[in-house]
Image (tube, helix red, strand yellow):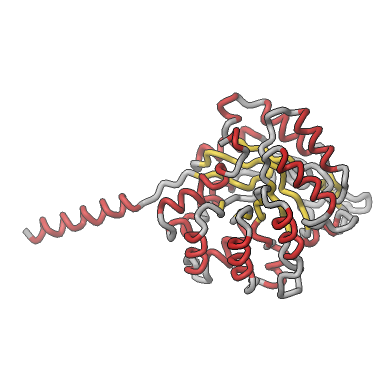
Amino acid sequence: MPYLRTALCLLATLCALHATARDYRYTDAHLHYVDFFQETDGMASLLEQMDAHRIEHVMISGISVAKKWHENEPKRPRYYAGDDAGAYWFSATDHIVAHALQGLSAEQRQRFHPFLTGFNPNDKNADEHVRRLLEMYPGLWQGIGEIFTRHDDLTALTQSDTPRANSEALRRIYFLAAEHDLPVMIHSNITSKRERNPLYLPELEEALRDHPTVRFIWAHAGTSMEIHRHQEKLEFLFGELERMLELYPNLYIDLSWTMLEPYLLDSDGQPDGRWVRLVERYPDRFMIGSDVVGRFKRLGEHMQGFDVFLDALPEVVAQRVAQENFLAILPKKER
């Protein structure tokens, strides 16, 4: 009998573990089909990785700038920060994405949610360019972005005025987004590499306040790899984000890779309780993304890296964050 009881206890434990295991299905809310040289592994590679790692849907966009290989550089840079050569606004990126999607079957295309990004956010002509692309590919585009503003060294490399989230050019883009029911993903650093305060936050807040009908996705909540290289962790970020989520119902947060550490997970790799409770309080306002750029071999690794944090959430909330929240803010005809 003791052996039987032991066996039954072991069986019950195994069943409980199986019952609590979560089989997440993902939506990647932040993926770039091309890199900073407008090159890509291609759609076949992307679909292969999606199928292998239970990624059912993807927000797909180009990249609005191209990195220059300068005449005086003997070796081609591998990344936009590889050398001091400039970057320039590159409108053909949207056509690259559209061409790739048009080569898919109708069933495959349903898994992709393309965002327009190939415009200069300092140019007040940008809204007319976006309007032309909407007309050129009717029914294709489901959002606008990622718009690069306050993107540390990247926007500096464009060798022009640094784009701001509250510029007149972008106000015109937001009015167009509202007209077409398009969400907007925006990269707007919350601060500079050295200031330990929310230096640039008023720019984004003005856009949120003045355009309440536009659904804004804040790319990695204003953080960046370059900021973390200088400051490691922004201690003020949590409080500001908590305040903004309460004030602005049109704000959504992309928890792509610069948010996983050091925010969602602590130094021991365990979920941070404050962030768990914040996501529970606003279960429809967070989404996860890989932020990969044209290379897809590590796509599954990036998405599954969120599992530890997702497992700390109630299962229904975790599934919203992993898959549903991004899809819920697409244009009504796409939902």
Q: Quadrant for residue 258, please give it.
A: bottom right
Residue 204 higher or lower than 95, as above or below: below
Q: Position of residue 283 (x, y in %)?
A: 50, 55
* Rendering coords of residue 64 (x, y %): 78, 45
Q: Tell me if residue 33 can be seen.
A: no
The structure residue drawn at horizontal position 88% and vertical position 47%, both measured from the top left corner, is 123
Q: Nearer the viewer, residue 281 or 4?
A: 281
- Residue 230, how many percent across, how many down? 72, 71
Quarter of the figure with the N terminus: bottom left
Most extreme residue toward the left, as rendered? 1
Which residue: 63% across, 58% down? 248
Quarter holding residue 254: bottom right
The correct choice, above or below, for 57 with respect to 101 in the image is below
Q: Quadrant of the C terminus?
A: top right
Compared across the picture, whether 222 is left or right of 306 comes to right
The answer to whether one can see residue 108 in this image is yes
250 vs 306, left or right, is right
The correct choice, above or below, for 211 with respect to 237 in the image is above
Q: Residue furthest right?
A: 72
Seen in the image, is 125 located left or right of residue 26? right
Residue 13 placement, left or right of 94? left
Between 89 and 250, the residue placed more toward the observer is 250
Q: Which corner quadrant of the image does residue 295 belong to?
A: top right
Q: Where is residue 281 drawn, in percent x and y?
A: 49, 61
Q: Please give the name of the residue rendered at 76% of the width and 73% of the height, measured from the top-left corner.
A: 194
The residue lying at 72 percent from left, 65 percent from top is 201
